[in-house]
Amino acid sequence: MEKLWAGRTDGSVDPTADDFNSSIRVDSRMYEEDIKGSVAHAEMLASTGIITDADRDAIVGGLSSILSDIKSGKLAIDPTAEDIHTFVETELTERIGDAGKKLHTARSRNDQVALDTRLYLKKEAEGVLSLVCDLIRVLRDRAEENKETVMPGYTHLQRAQPVSFGHHLLAYAMMLTRDCGRIRDAVLRMDVSPIGACALAGTTFAVDRAAEAAALGFPAVTENSIDSVSDRDFCIELMSAFSILMMHLSRFSEEIVLWSSSEFGYIELDSAFSTGSSIMPQKKNPDMAELVRGKTGRVYGDLLSLLVTMKSLPLAYNKDMQEDKEATFDALDTVRVCLSVFTPMIKTMGVRADRMLAAARDGFITATDLADWLAKRGVPFRAAYKTTGRMISYCAAEGLTLDEVTLEKYREFSPVFDETLYEAIDPGAAMKKRVSYGGTAPESVEKQIGYIDGFLAAFGKAAEA
Ligand code: ARG
């Protein structure tokens, strides 16, 4: 294919160098945005009198036929083209002749690529948001189902206090609401049109940037032409939001892996979301969760790779910046595939309430409740803490749980004890008593579900707006 930029050079690039220089394998996925951007550009050029209406009609007609031919498979994107922008422009000129050569008036690939990438990421980020909302919805439903399910809550991975499994699940839902906020913020800041910045300095043509931006759905235009073509913050910001989202999915995955082990046995993954071993017939492995955990590193890597690429670049455009899309699209694809597997995995996982309760009965996890019981009867908390500590070492030495100790024995440790202590050390009762705002009691879980419902309704409305 003859180079659009042949002139200063004869355009005969060494084939290996040519392939090295090409980004079509990565940026061809933006063909629709590229064509949409070019249609708006041709319309703006005609409305400002820079090209004639006849040229505009030829360009718009040619671009529309290219779009429908790519979509129907009639036109294959040439893998040897330099990038999607040159491919579309070359094809246009082949189809409509000289009018096609006027499309690139008052435009450069530098502002064009910034425009296409923003348009593409804006659309794709909305898709990710709806996947995150699907996961939040599943967590909300599973939390409601499990608001009374008692499990040990952990600190230091040591059993700490009984919590509701629904409460634990909603902790992840809350993280995901923040992820939605971060992605939405990134989209809002990305939603500014760079087209018209041209190569770096703007143009001598009397373009109407605002009209072109409005036709493409942007509420505003960028303020500085050099910044417009040098900026990849919008990719970095989106990948930062994705990295934090992946960090949450990875922590959750780690718990899924632990919980599905025989040591914990708190959940059983549906067969559709687990795998077997090629040698050990007994195995049911949580590969999906492990892969989500693993792919988190990959998304961090994408973010880091672009941060490092950008860190020393002088203004304005440098070819290094072509690397932006490979990293950003990889992060996008990875987040999307992880969410698509993770959500149904959570939706279908079996919950072993019996195992959770048994674990909650073991390990003295209501020790705090026993100390609180004494403190509520006038024993200073520090003294109550000591007495309870002594009870625990007694039980540990005798191989007893707190509820197996007789009242007589309790009284040897403190005369304040009476039979109502047994209710305090029941893990279910202890969980239900934590009614403080945001606590683990079922009524608090209900309130959190209300919060999530409000969030999803408001977020859905914002997406429609
Ligand atoms: N393929 C290029 C990229 O993705 C498009 C911009 C090329 N601009 C240039 N001056 N060579 O960055």
Image (spheres, rainbow, N blue to C red):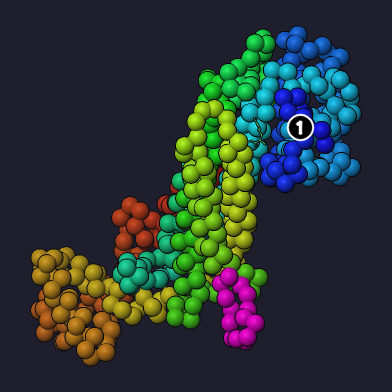
* Position of the C terminus by quadrant: top right
Quadrant containing ligand 1: top right
Q: In this view, does 70 lie to the left or right of 416?
A: right
Q: How crowded is mark 1: few (under 14 residues within 10 Å), some or many (20 or more)?
A: some
* Position of the N terminus by quadrant: top right
Question: Residue type at mark 1?
Answer: Gly
Determine if residue 125 is in view.
Answer: no
User: Is 240 rendered above or below residue 406?
Assistant: above
Residue range corresponding to the magenta coloring: 274-287
Q: In this view, does 393 lie to the left or right of 1?
A: left
**Label 1 sits on residue:** 11
The reply to whether the magenta stretch includes residue 173 is no
Which of 244 and 151 lies nearest the eye of the viewer? 244
Which of 137 and 426 lies nearest the eye of the viewer? 137
- Measured from the top left, where is residue 3 in percent x and y? 78, 32
- Measured from the top left, where is residue 444 in percent x and y? 38, 56
Residue at 75% of width from left, 11% of height from top? 50
**Magenta segment, prevailing SS (helix, strand or loop):** loop
User: Is 414 rendered above or below residue 255?
Assistant: below
> CB at mark 1 closer than 8 A to ligand 1?
no
